Image (cartoon, grey):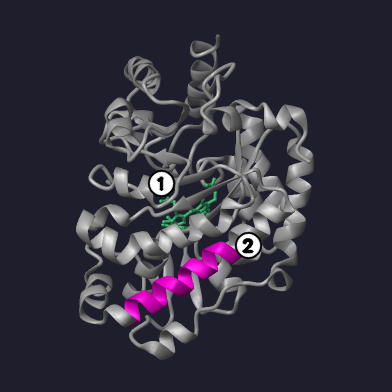
Amino acid sequence: MPSTSLDRSPYLLAARGEPVPHTPVWFMRQAGRALPEYRKVREGITMLESCMRPDLVVEITLQPVRRYGVDAAIFFSDIVAPLQFAGYDIEIKPGVGPVAADPIRDAAGVAAVRPVTAADVPFTTEAVQQLASELGGTPLIGFAGAPFTVASYLVEGGPSKDFAKTKAMMHGSPDLWHALADRLADVAIAYLAVQVEAGASAIQLFDSWAGGLSPRDYERFVLPHSAKVFEAIKSYGVPRVHFGVNTGELLGLMSAAGADVVGVDWRVPLDEAVRRLDTPKPVQGNLDPALLFAGWDAIEPEIDRILDEGKKAPGHIFNLGHGVPPNADPDVLARITKYVQNRSAR
Ligand code: CP3
């Protein structure tokens, strides 16, 4: 059973659309290179290795909570980590991102992708359990990559700007595409289930690159697979957040896929974002990460505007419109956290 304080935490209240003591705030990619204490513990240790060590996962997940006083922690892992844990050959290259050894072109390639079982990831279960206990009243967000965004790395072979090969597969070999996306839905479901069963109190499905698709293609090739993920997690009763970048045209569809909370990047104001949803729901966002470098006099009015626009939603979780850049100043993030919490306090 969750503790009462966890159940009444600002993040979970906002995610359920209930009144909050203050607007909760956390930052996507809050654990990572912007923090000197992160760079220190990661020295000489690969990303994969660090994800398999509960002591490091716990420490890195807690670092931004200690440093910023954010209202939620996000489990330290990566969207391709569950593929690696299940034996798939994909590497996270520093400064680049996920790079697949053998990009998927056919049914044999799809067959090489498999979901983790709890037995593959005892270190994940251990780390989440320890985090849930150490975090007490602060929620732990579990996450996974959505089928499209993960597929883009597997089909392109690495990061891409236009997703040309992925789109060619969707339209040219739709059966192959749907088989791959269906498997990747199972990959996400299995990894999310491990995290929630071990004590994560919310989940976020990252479809970071979905904004590269037209609404028509999204609806036909992606929505059914992301919907499968949300549907499978529904019975756990934890809030399900859905986020992507440049998804202004897709917000209604991404919401309809089964999200309880919709993440919004900086391109669409939150009040307008709520109007674009299939039905009014809590939203998360949406300070432009570029503003982190603009000086406080520029940041403060932007926060005020976002808090105002967020009042039009049934709930608002403050965040950046995308992840913390590696060269961000931690002091600026700490100041934003305190400002949002104080300014919104009732
Ligand atoms: O605080 C957190 O959010 C930490 C957990 C986290 C990581 N990756 C750790 C990580 C989360 C939630 C992710 C998600 C992720 N990974 C996404 C979706 C979110 C988004 O940013 O849109 C995507 C697209 C990836 C794929 C990926 N993995 C990229 C693009 C990179 C960056 C490559 C680089 O070095 O610039 C990674 C590697 C990665 N994942 C790092 C971290 C901390 C950096 C690697 C390192 O520190 O050595």
Residue 182 part of the magenta segment: yes
Spatial separation of the CA atoms under disc 2 and disc 1? 29 Å
| Disc 1: which residue | 243
- Measuring from the top left, give residue 84's x and y in whole percent: 56, 72
Pointer 1 residue Cβ closer than 8 Å to ligand 1: yes
Q: Quadrant of residue 288?
A: top left
Specify the quadrant that holds the N terminus: top right
**Residue 88, numbered label:** none
SS at mark 2 in the image: loop
SS at mark 1 in the image: strand
| Disc 2: which residue | 45
Q: Check disc 1 and give the amino acid type.
A: Phe
- Measuring from the top left, give residue 47's x and y in whole percent: 57, 62
On the question of residue 46 being in view, the answer is: no
| Vertical comparison of 141 with 314: above or below | below
Q: Nearer the viewer, residue 162 or 68?
A: 162
Q: Quadrant of residue 162?
A: bottom left
Q: Nearer the viewer, residue 31 or 162?
A: 162
On the question of residue 217 being in view, the answer is: yes
